[in-house]
Image (cartoon, rainbow, N blue to C red):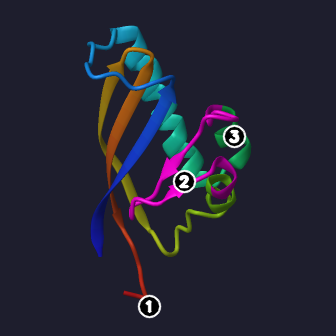
Amino acid sequence: MKRTLPFLLLLGGSLVSYTQPASKEDETTLIAINRQFIKNFLSNDTMAHNKIIHPFDFLFIGTNGQLHSRNEYMQAWANGYNKTEMPEFNLEEVQVRIFNNIALIVAKTRDKTMKNGE
């Protein structure tokens, strides 16, 4: 089964109603953080991942729209990736948007998930 998973990473303060273009330096930095985010996921590296997730203002929005605290998110992250169940995972596209002092990274990924050996 192939599907597309959006990864959403929010960094910073409050959302405003307009977007400003990201500088090349900001965009490069945020893309590197997103690559680390994906690398941490694929290796279940909670130590490295803990360094890039805000200690207080982190909020995860699940695929069903449910909100999860940082603690809930990090507990699931510790063994969230299983190569046997998801033998293919590829980062395909990254978009960076900056809203005043908040950054939004949307990453399109494609994976293959195995269920009951299929």
Give the residue furthest to the bottom. 116
Q: Residues within 10 Å of mark 3 (few under 14, many from 20)?
A: some
Give whichever of 17, 89 is nearer the camera: 17
Q: Is residue 49 above or below residue 88?
A: above
> Which comes sooner in the sequence, label 2 or label 3?
2
Q: Is residue 57 magenta?
A: yes
Q: Secondary structure at mark 3?
A: helix
On residue 116, the disc is 1
Q: Which residue in the structure is indicated by mark 3?
A: 50
At 32% across and 14% down in the image, what residue appears?
Answer: 22
Cα separation, mark 2 vs mark 3, equals: 14 Å
Q: Is the C terminus in the top left, top right, bottom left or bottom right quadrant?
A: bottom left
> What amino acid is labelled 3 in the image?
Asn
Q: Is residue 3 magenta?
A: no
> Which comes sooner in the sequence, label 1 or label 3?
3
Residue 8 x/y as whole percent: 41, 43
Q: Which residues are magenta?
A: 52-72
